[in-house]
Image: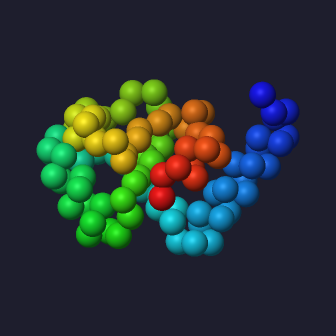
Amino acid sequence: MLPLPIRVYGLTSALSCKFAQDDLVIVNSLEIPTDEQKFIEELMEHRRWGISVLFINETDVMPRNITLATDKMESVALMPYYGLNVYSMLKYD
């Protein structure tokens, strides 16, 4: 594993790059009104988020509806903030 300062630099660089490319969206909550996969697919298309999305949450426990809606979607990942890494940020648009 790389030393902590190098990992922090990598995350900072990746976040800065995503922000500069307008690929970073910050929301107040991951609560959604339904647990249907179609809702997430339409949301991704409407917001032009691309074909893959990485949702980061402040806790280990993700909201029920978003967990069920994204469960079978290979192009969408849910992750707590402390699990965020450069590889995941680059893998998901």
In the depicted structure, whether residue 17 falls above or below residue 29:
below
Give the camera-side residue of 51 and 61.
Answer: 51
Q: Residue 31 at what x, y percent from top left?
A: 29, 45
In the depicted structure, whether residue 44 falls above or below residue 86:
below
In the depicted structure, whether residue 39 falls above or below residue 23:
above
In the depicted structure, whether residue 48 falls above or below residue 8:
below
Q: Residue 47 at what x, y percent from top left?
A: 32, 68
In the rendered view, does 33 fall on the left or right side of 66? left
Q: Is residue 50 visible?
A: yes
Q: What residue do we see at 48% from left, 58% from top?
A: 93
In the rendered view, does 26 fall on the left or right side of 63? right
Quadrant containing the N terminus is top right
Q: Is residue 28 visible?
A: no
Q: What residue do we see at 51% from left, 66% from top?
A: 23
Q: Residue 22 at what x, y percent from top left?
A: 53, 71
Q: What residue do we see at 41% from left, 38% from top?
A: 78
In the rendered view, does 35 fall on the left or right side of 21? left
Q: Quadrant of residue 62?
A: top left
Q: Residue 9 at what x, y percent from top left?
A: 79, 49
